[in-house]
Image (cartoon, rainbow, N blue to C red):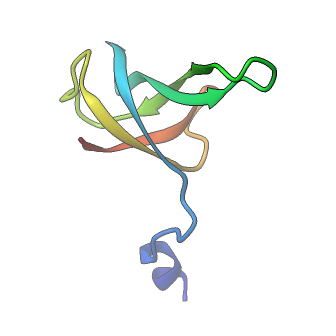
Amino acid sequence: MSEQAAQAPAKNQRKLVGRVTSNKMQKTVVVRVERRVRDALMGKTITLSKKYHAHVESGEFGEGDLVEIAECRPISRTKSWRVTRLV
């Protein structure tokens, strides 16, 4: 039973696409995810961004790369995301 649970992928796993802004840490990259929202009062479209620390086993991603990150269990105090692929 535990082997099946370990192999089954998470069904509702959050995935985001963003750009790598820093790869200076070991096994960690900082990914900036941008989203566009409409201002409630003026109606202007604005771009909001948020930075996520994501875990990567090998240092294969450089600054400026577009990557997909997926939510996972907490790896450290700031890392709860894992880089899944290069977009």
Q: Position of residue 31 (x, y in %)?
A: 43, 24
The foreground one among 35 and 17 is 35
Quadrant holding the C terminus: top left
Horizontal side, residue 44 vs residue 29: left or right: right
**In the picture shown, does residue 28 fall above or below 25?**
below
Total tally of numbered discs in the picture: 0
The foreground one among 84 and 24 is 84
Horizontal side, residue 46 vs residue 42: left or right: left
Q: Residue furthest bottom?
A: 1
Q: Position of residue 2 (x, y in %)?
A: 54, 81
Taking the image as drawn, is residue 17 in sight?
yes
Taking the image as drawn, is residue 25 in sight?
no
State the residue at coordinates (47%, 84%).
4
Horizontal side, residue 55 vs residue 37: left or right: left
State the residue at coordinates (52%, 68%).
10
Q: Position of residue 78 (x, y in %)?
A: 61, 26
Q: Residue furthest right?
A: 41
Horizontal side, residue 53 vs residue 21: left or right: right
Q: Position of residue 50 (x, y in %)?
A: 57, 22
Instruction: Examine the image and state in which quarter residue 69 appears.
Output: top left
Quadrant holding the N terminus: bottom right
State the residue at coordinates (24%, 25%).
65
Q: Residue furthest front?
A: 42
Instruction: Examine the image and state in which quarter residue 49 appears.
Output: top right
